[in-house]
Image (tube, grey):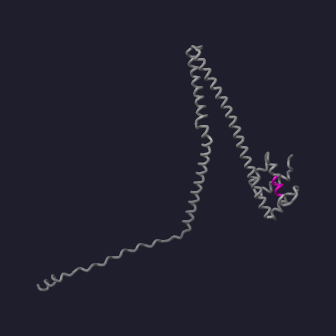
Amino acid sequence: MALPAPVIWTAFSIAKRYLPQLTGRLFGEKGEATAEKVVDLATGLLGLPKSAGTEEIMERLAGDSLAAEQLQLSLAQIEYEEYKAEIEDRASARRSQEARGSARGNWMLGGVTLGLLACLVAVATGRITETGALALITTIAGALLKMLSDAFAFEFGSSRGSKEKDAQITEFKQAMLQFGSESIRRTAETAEKAVSRAPVVMAPAAAAPEAAPERPTSRDFVDELRQRLT
């Protein structure tokens, strides 16, 4: 049963005012159920009937800050539950797709094995003696053997086991790089602000070295006396 348009509009008005990111979940397959939750939650907190109009609900919320805060927290919880359900649906669809892919791989592996056995039987029985036909069968058998070896390498090697790990590691590295870049940027901005706000202090000029006092020369009294006598 489709909800009346006023109910959807009321839910949209409430979400737009108190949790804008929830507005996108009011449309689509599950949108009506989410809209009904929003209206029921607001009217329940305010003690109003479910048939209350949009203007009445918005006016009561504007005049009751406590109810508005409780409503905002409850809307955030609804948005979280919707997001969690969406993630689980995606994971379920991914698992189903992987299961179908695994089944197709098993059928392909069985076909390759049967084809390789048929080639070996045709050569081993000796029924085909023409050189061209034997060369063609040998070529086909080689191609099938290569497919079979690749399938075993994927199944029992590190390719399948590490496929999801590689994706997780890539996402982790990307997140760490973004975090590191953001940290570096913030550190640089903080350093620039600190430098721009710091007072400029002029370094005192280096004082000129004082001249060393002249050492008095020693007088030669004997030589002076000799000069006077002569």
Residue displayed at 81% across by 52% down: 35
Q: Nearer the viewer, residue 172 or 60?
A: 172
| Vertical placement of residue 76 versus 204, above or below | above
Residue 150 in the image, given as x and y percentages of width and height: 59, 31
Would you identify the image quadrant in which residue 99 lies?
top right
**Visible residue check, residue 10:** no
Would you identify the image quadrant in which residue 133 lies?
top right
Left or right of 87 in this view: 52:
right
Q: Nearer the viewer, residue 171 or 95?
A: 95
**Visible residue check, residue 85:** yes
Residue 30 in the image, given as x and y percentages of width and height: 79, 47
Residue displayed at 45% across by 73% down: 204
Residue 176 in the image, given as x and y percentages of width and height: 59, 51
Residue displayed at 58% across by 38% down: 158
Q: Is residue 121 magenta?
A: no
Specify the farthest residue to the left: 230
> What span is colored magenta in the figure?
37-42
Q: How many marks?
A: 0
| Vertical placement of residue 93 versus 226, above or below | above
Residue 189 in the image, given as x and y percentages of width and height: 58, 61
Specify the farthest residue to the bottom: 229
Magenta stretch prevailing secondary structure:
helix
